[in-house]
């Protein structure tokens, strides 16, 4: 039987019977603090476990379609054990902050409303927090039905309603069935290969050391895994793992975890910290986010105000910058920037709430490493009108803003798997390569500009062999990786060819015209007069010389020497032949053989040494390998 983890959380007004309900469902009293027992209210998060099995349609099973096409009896049912971590939150208005730390990780809510009191202020606030934090599934549990058996008005028609009494036990079995139905219809918590344990408690156990507890999302953690605590980049390792008191070797998303950590003191880690695997980005003090105020709220947000942010299991203070508006009113949505007093560690796609005396607004992180400097610097400020930006919208916005983005960091700190990011890049029409992704239109334009520049050069300067790569790079302001990819795209299909340091059309051959041609012809004649006793370079016309070199008609060597390409090849051939016959020769012997002078033969032989043709030993030269 396969196991599916889920987090189910309570929500609702103070004293409405959340903790009593958890006890009735699980037998565990979630109020664990002495102060909670003394005051009879919940102050901080409480935890319990419920394990129930239910048959679930195995929709992902390939055999379904086969059995259906064979006239079977619908999808086969698979027995699933639901390992439900229950998080009980406080309802008192003084502890809404603590409640938010629990609500952030619920897959579904047990929304408790006491039959005798009905909808109350923190009922409303908790519902808003659930909305802001993206908890879409829930069950209204109308408690205390022994006190008031009648119906009460409730806001959401799409959630089932179950009436219970924790005192008499009435309705509890029906509630368990409704929980199963709700979770069976819910997708299993996503595993995107990016585990994050949001710490809600830390303590030490004698002889064991530091233990952190929290809800695991996004991936798995196994015993002995190397981990890192963020913010802070604190390296650690999972020595042992527990789930609801049971030791386990590995834990997956949606599980409540207690992890014994190595190499970290208990006071170095606290609620709000995230335990994750190394390589998933670094903390940042600036986020860009899509901010929303519910149309049911009576609050507003102002540009430049300092706000309290509940994000993950923690709380931080930040200054808010609204990009396109001075204030945000109920029912409105805008993109803004949160500038934190200290770095926070979160992912694109994470949700948070903004709260003062009451909950004011909700936010969705769009850029977890945003840049300060106004809307122009923001990669995502254009997404204000997109209600639920997904990976493709985000990537489109990022590419539109930056043009070219490095792949190594692109949406690593996000709720999207690497495969989803890859797919979104393609859907966004990006040019994708190993090192970077480029906006598709920008890339096409760049290729067109490069093509135009090379063609214009061939046309205006036929004497030049092609466009130097350095010039192309400078013109585009591109880095080495972008240039390499660009050259690749230009040369693929044979449109262009690359010769060492230039790029050109394949058919292009440097060709001098007019006066330059006349000078070059004259120079060629001069160099041919006495092929191994040529004039110095500085005695030649520089432009004509450059042209002849680019056209590969002459070879330059030494500090100041030049000979015809054919003379050079002939000299090399003769030296090789001479050494082959003689075994070795001095420089003067070679000079005599070529009927040249020291000025030419010394650098020529040095060039041949460098090219690996000849080798110098003492006063003589030999062929390499002899
Ligand atoms: N008669 C009756 N009383 C109930 C029922 N459920 C809870 N109570 C009582 O209501 C009071 C509050 O219950 P709790 O479970 O502590 O309420 P809570 O919602 O957890 O309160 P906070 O966590 O402080 O927000 C307690 O005295 C419970 O015994 C019920 O179904 N019937
Ligand atoms: Mg309680």
Image: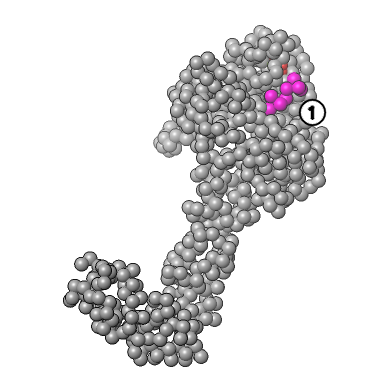
Is 167 left, or right, of 405 in this rendering? right
Q: Main secondary structure of the magenta part?
A: helix
Q: Residue at x 69, y 30 (%)?
A: 315
Q: Relative to residue 369, is residue 512 depicted above or below?
A: below
- Quadrant position of residue 116: top right
Instruction: Tell me the SS state at disc 1.
Output: loop
Left of 375 or right of it: where is 419? left
Is residue 302 shown left or right of residue 168? right
Q: Residue 46: image x %, image y %?
A: 63, 18
Q: Is residue 457 magenta?
A: no
Ligand 1 location (quadrant) = top right
Residue lying at 55% horizontally and 61% vertically, measured from the top left: 478
Find out whether residue 97 is within the magenta segment.
Answer: yes
Task: Name the colour scheme.
Answer: one colour
Q: Which residue is at the front of the view, 446 or 83?
A: 446
Tell me what residue is drawn at x 47 percent, y 90 percent.
Answer: 519
Do we see residue 65 in this rendering?
yes
Crowding near the residue tagged with mark 1, few <14, some 14–19, many ≥20 C-alpha atoms within 10 Å: few
Q: Nearer the viewer, residue 350 or 275?
A: 275
Quadrant of the drawing holding the C terminus = bottom left
| Residue range corresponding to the magenta coloring | 92-100
Residue labelled with disc 1: 357
Place of residue 395 in the rendered image (x, y in percent of width and height, measured from the top left) = 59, 50
Left-right relation of 217 to 311: left
Up the image or down, 393 lies above or below 300; here it is below
Q: Position of residue 13 (x, y in %)?
A: 74, 21
């Amino acid at each position: 039987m396969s196991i599916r983890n889920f987090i189910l959380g309570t929500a609702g007004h103070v004293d409405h019977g959340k903790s009593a309900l958890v006890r009735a469902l699980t037998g565990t009293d979630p109020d664990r603090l002495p102060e909670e027992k003394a005051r009879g209210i919940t102050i901080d998060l409480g935890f319990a476990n419920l394990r129930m099995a239910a048959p679930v349609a195995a929709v992902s099973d390939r055999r379904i379609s086969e059995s259906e096409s064979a006239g079977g009896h619908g999808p086969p049912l698979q027995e699933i054990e639901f390992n439900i971590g229950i998080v009980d939150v406080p309802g008192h208005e003084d502890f809404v902050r603590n409640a938010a730390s629990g609500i952030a990780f619920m897959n579904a809510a047990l929304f408790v409303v006491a039959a005798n009191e009905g909808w109350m202020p923190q009922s409303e606030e908790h519902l808003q927090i659930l909305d802001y934090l993206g908890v879409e599934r829930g069950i209204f549990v109308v408690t205390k039905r022994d006190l008031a058996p009648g119906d009460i008005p409730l806001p959401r028609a799409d959630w089932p309603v179950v009436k219970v009494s924790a005192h008499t036990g009435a309705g509890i079995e029906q509630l368990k069935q409704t929980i199963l139905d709700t979770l069976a219809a819910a997708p299993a918590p996503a595993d995107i290969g990016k585990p994050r344990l949001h710490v809600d408690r830390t303590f030490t156990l004698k002889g064991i050391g530091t233990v952190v507890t929290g809800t695991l999302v996004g991936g798995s953690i196994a015993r002995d895994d190397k981990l890192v605590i963020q913010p802070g980049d604190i390296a650690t390792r999972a020595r042992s793992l527990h789930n609801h008191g049971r030791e386990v070797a590995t834990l997956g998303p949606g599980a409540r975890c207690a992890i014994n950590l190595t190499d970290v003191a208990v006071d170095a880690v606290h609620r709000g910290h995230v335990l994750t695997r190394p390589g998933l980005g670094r903390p940042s003090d600036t986020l860009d986010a899509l901010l929303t105020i519910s149309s049911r709220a009576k609050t507003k947000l102002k540009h430049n105000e300092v706000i309290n942010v509940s994000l993950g299991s923690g709380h931080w203070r930040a200054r808010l910058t609204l990009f396109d508006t001075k204030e945000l009113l109920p029912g409105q949505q805008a993109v803004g920037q949160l500038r934190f007093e200290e770095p926070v560690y979160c992912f694109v796609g994470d949700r948070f709430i903004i709260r003062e005396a009451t909950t004011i607004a909700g936010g969705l992180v769009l850029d977890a490493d945003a840049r300060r400097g106004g809307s122009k610097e923001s990669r995502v400020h254009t997404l204000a009108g997109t209600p639920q930006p997904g990976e493709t919208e985000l990537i489109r916005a990022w590419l539109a803003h930056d043009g070219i983005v490095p792949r190594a960091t692109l949406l690593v700190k996000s709720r999207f798997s690497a495969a989803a990011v890859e797919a979104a890049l393609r859907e966004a029409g990006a040019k994708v390569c190993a090192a970077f992704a480029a906006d598709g239109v920008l890339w096409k334009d760049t290729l067109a500009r490069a093509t135009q520049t090379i063609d214009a050069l061939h046309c205006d300067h036929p004497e030049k062999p092609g466009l130097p790569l350095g010039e192309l790079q400078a013109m585009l302001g591109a880095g080495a990786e972008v240039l390499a990819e660009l050259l690749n795209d230009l040369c693929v299909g044979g449109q262009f060819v690359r010769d060492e340091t230039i790029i050109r059309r394949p058919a292009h051959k440097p060709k001098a015209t007019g006066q330059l041609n006349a000078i070059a012809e004259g120079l060629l004649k001069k160099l041919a007069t006495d092929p191994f006793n040529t004039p110095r370079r500085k005695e030649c016309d520089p432009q004509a010389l450059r042209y002849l070199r680019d056209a590969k008609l002459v070879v330059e060597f030494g500090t100041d020497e030049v000979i015809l390409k054919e003379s050079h090849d002939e000299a090399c051939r003769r030296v090789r032949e001479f050494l082959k016959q003689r075994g070795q020769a001095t420089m003067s012997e070679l000079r005599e053989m070529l009927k040249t002078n020291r000025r030419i033969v010394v650098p020529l032989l040095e060039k041949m040494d460098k090219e690996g043709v000849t080798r110098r030993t003492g006063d003589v030269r030999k062929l390499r390998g002899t």
